[in-house]
Amino acid sequence: MIANTPPTPYYAVIFTSLRTEGDNGYNVMSDAMDELAKKQPGYLGIESARDGLGITVSYWRSLEDIKNWKANTSHQFAQKTGREKWYEDFKVRICKVERDYSL
């Protein structure tokens, strides 16, 4: 599903990843983090796709909202577990969306 974002400007966090073999609890944690993110101030939506390479883009109202999400203790636990068990490699990019348009 395409996220329904507000008028610009807003911010995007692009998380690109390569997973390790097996689930190892990943799907349960991923679902929990999606639900928790939705409750965070400034959260605007998410888009995600995986076919070998995973790309997840979450949208936020401000850089402060992104910083607060990164500092969330449950999210920090998921990040730590991801580094230890779920990802062979990943990269995070934070961008300011200055323009968007659609069909």
Image (spheres, rainbow, N blue to C red):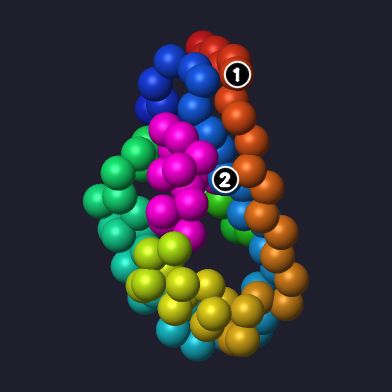
Q: Nearer the viewer, residue 66 or 54?
A: 66
Res 31 quadrant in image: bottom left
Q: Residues within 10 Å of mark 1 (few under 14, many from 20)?
A: few
Kind of residue indicated by mark 1: Glu
The answer to whether residue 1 is above or below residue 78 is above
* Residue at the spot 32% in from the left edge and 67% down from the top edge: 32
Query: Distance between the Cα atoms at labels 1 and 2?
Result: 14 Å
Residue 78 percent across, percent down from the top left? 46, 75
Q: Which region of the structure is painted magenta?
A: 57-70
x, y (%) of residue 73?
37, 72
Q: Which mark is residue 98?
A: 1
Q: Secondary structure at mark 1?
A: loop
Residue 70 lies, with reference to residue 66, above or below; the image says: below
Task: Determine the secondary structure under disc 2.
Answer: strand
Q: Please state which amino acid type lies under the numbered disc 2.
A: Val
Mark 2 sits on what residue? 13
Q: Is residue 3 visible?
A: no
